[in-house]
Image (cartoon, grey):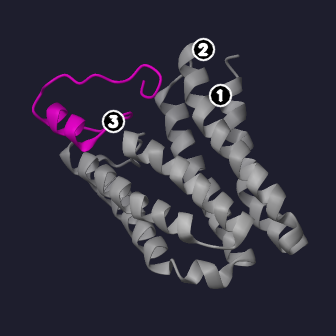
Amino acid sequence: MKRLPLALILFRAALAPALPALALAFADAARPWLAALLVAGLLSDVLDGIVARAAGVSTVALRRLDSRVDLFFWLGALAAAAVLDGPALRTVAPGVAAVLALEAACQAASFARFRRAPCTHAFLSKLWGLFLGAGFVALFATGRPGALRVALAWGVLSQLDVLAIVLLLPSWQSDVPSAWHALRLRRGLPIRRHRLLNG
């Protein structure tokens, strides 16, 4: 049980290069497999934190690894989409660029302030993972980027929330649910974290 959270994270890490590799090797025939693997990766992301907290192994190091692997996993999904649905993906290029730019800004701000990467696991980011999974599954299933466009708009919102958290925190912390919670921490006030969603 205590090793399961790490196994789930490593499973998702293995999927990141597997997704574009499948797209390159099998083209359109890979679409149902890509959709299934995306769902499996998303489920592993939901379960790893829950299992880690239940098993008492939810360490900061594990949470930081989870955050890095999440980024790697979604970049793998993006690469697979570029292989199979390049023209459709180009129609949402501004949204992709905005999300990537904000991700870079969050990383830069966190390293500038705390000398380490952010690890907020904010509520909006967790919802974004669900939207992003649905968007990529819909893209692979239909070749249409409509759901992904909605996911990217939510992604901009969630990244702005993370950036605000990083700028507001008085010191580095993991598992900060929102910018409002970060503001409370900055004011020296206590916050409540959800038992299942945050530490």
Q: Tell me residue 18's x, y (percent).
A: 79, 58
Question: Which dot marks residue 177?
Answer: 3
Q: Is residue 57 left or right of residue 14?
A: left
Tell me where residue 74 sits by quadrant: bottom right
Vertical order, 51 against 166 (above or below): above
Vertical order, 183 against 162 (above or below): above
Q: Give the labeled residue for mark 1.
A: 5
Q: Are marks 1 and 2 in contact (CB under 8 Å)?
A: yes
Vertical order, 86 against 115 (above or below): below
Q: Is residue 94 left or right of residue 90?
A: left
First to last magenta residue range? 170-199
**Observer-nearest of 21 and 46:** 46
Q: Earlier in the sequence, mark 1 or mark 2?
A: 1
**Observer-nearest of 32 and 63:** 32
Query: Residue, x 72% and y 32% (percent of image)?
Result: 7
Nearer the camera: disc 3 or disc 2:
3
Q: Earlier in the sequence, mark 3 or mark 1?
A: 1
Counting the numbered discs, the total is: 3
Q: Tell me residue 100's x, y (percent).
A: 45, 68
Q: Earlier in the sequence, mark 3 or mark 2?
A: 2
Query: Residue, x 41% and y 49% (percent of image)?
Result: 117
Q: CA distance from mark 3 to mark 2?
A: 22 Å
Question: Which dot marks residue 55?
Answer: 2
Tell me if I can see residue 122 in this picture. Answer: no
Q: Amino acid at mark 1?
A: Pro
Tell me where residue 144 sits by quadrant: bottom right
